[in-house]
Image (cartoon, helix red, strand yellow):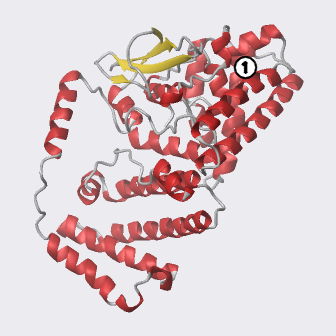
Amino acid sequence: MNEKEYMKRVSSLFEKIRAESAANEEEEILFKRYRDAEFDLTVEYRLGPDFPTERREALRAVYQQVQNHTEELRKKYLSGDLQKQEFVDLMQSSTADTVKKYATVLTQEEIAAFFGHGKGAYKLPFPSDEVE
Amino acid sequence: MAKLYGHAVKISWLGADHTYVTSSDGGKWGCWGRDSGGREICSGTGSSKRANCLSQSSSHAGIIYGVTGVCHQTANRILYPAAAVVSRASGYWASIIMYGTYGTPNAAALIEWEVRKARCKKQSGDLGLKDRAIVFKTRAKAIKEPTIEHGINDYLDKVNAIYVKEANKMRITELDTAEKIDFLTQELELMVDFKLGAAKDSKKIKALQNLQSSLLHKKEGLDGALIGKDISAGHYAEQVNVLMMKFMEESNAQLGKEAHTKLFGMAPDTVFQIVDAKILTNYHKE
């Protein structure tokens, strides 16, 4: 899949998922289907369509674990249990942890193919003065 | 049709890139940061008016910085009409794991994004420098001292009359949910009489009142959950804002653009947040 095709597919992904939904589908279920489809599309684009299913599912398990953890951080920050800088630091260290966890499933070459090259590839763009 | 461009600027000490968006007709969206310099990393053809609508407000595009996304997700939302994403920015794929392509790390954020897109869907064409100059002129005019609307006193008297009847139990805790909602649906009807006058369509207003009632029931549940600390202030704000956006969308569908704009004093595609998550969070800390 080339970059143009990926962009086209990712920008129309939600509409595709919504079209396949029952009229009264619960928002949480819709969200989970969208999240899974977005994950599959990302893996297909970054690691190729032939990436083995077993390893894909291992990666998905890590991804879901990360999602659950960051959702907890978000809730704590929004409810005032975490200060801004604390939250930013935890999100940044979660990103580093995620890369390490992905590395338990992916080879070094695959990690580079997935995240890109350079130290900035594993960082969130968090200039702290931009976080309100 | 304009061309929309995604740009990346290296944050030297961090290594990751800040991203922002521009358009061929002079639009600039800083996405929480600078809107110049760096390198162009993606482009596509799309309506700059729609991009501008999606970017509201303050070029933040509905993203809560660090919570539902960073500048990458903000830029992707603004670039949506061009079906382009800033995927060549350093740190992009790490941010995708944390927030998703469009800043949808949870169901509430996903619905907010869906509603935002729907509200901006009717925007087409380009902003253009000439149009932008007119927009700025209109804004300058809008902050002039407002004139008193004809009939406002009569309207306010009628609103007061709704409440005076029940003045002996006006402490909010003494009213049950149905009563509170009834007051507000009556107020909506008076507001319609005042704003639309003869153009009022009772059938459509009834449908709007039913929707208002359903929205208020849902909000009542959220109020209870907030007070009982079952949900965070941020989550509450997100949910209430989504409810409000859905209501405005339905109002536009029922009444049509002209009547909707007259009733609420804003166009149907105006993106706004009725509850500021930050202020509410600070308040609920105390």
In the rendered structure, the answer to whether residue B21 lies left or right of residue A9 reads left
Q: In this view, does A117 lie above or below B274?
A: above
Q: Say whether residue A33 is left or right of residue B19.
A: right
| Res. A21 visible in picture | no
* Residue at horizontal 58 percent and vertical 38 percent from the top: A84
Q: Judge from the rendering whether residue A124 lies leftward or rightward of residue B24; answer left or right.
A: right
Quadrant of residue A66 within the rendered picture: top right
| Location of mark 1 (residue) | A44
Q: Quadrant of residue B181?
A: bottom left
Q: Residue at x 23, y 57 (%)?
A: B262
- Callout 1: 10 Å neighbours few (<14), some, many (20+)? some
Q: Up-down: is B77 above or below B191?
A: above
Picture coordinates of residue B149, whole percent (x, y):
13, 63
Which image quarter is the N terminus of chain B in?
Answer: top left
Which amino acid does the dot numbered 1 rest on?
Glu
Residue B247 at what x, y percent from top left?
43, 58
The residue at 43%/67% (across/down) is B212
Report the front residue among B83 and A59: A59
Residue at left offset 59%, top offset 24%: A9
Element type where label 1 sits in the image:
helix
Q: Nearer the viewer, residue B51 or B235?
A: B235
Which of the 4 quarters of the picture holds residue A45? top right
**Picture coordinates of residue A21, whole percent (x, y):** 64, 46
Which one is in front, B63 or B45? B63
Task: Identify the subunit bearing mark 1.
Answer: A
- In the picture, the quarter occupied by the C terminus of chain B is bottom right
Measured from the top left, where is residue A49 in percent x and y? Answer: 76, 17
Residue A21 higher or lower than B20, as above or below: below
Q: Is residue A74 above or below residue B70?
A: below
Question: Is B258 positioned to the left or the right of B52 in the image?
Answer: left
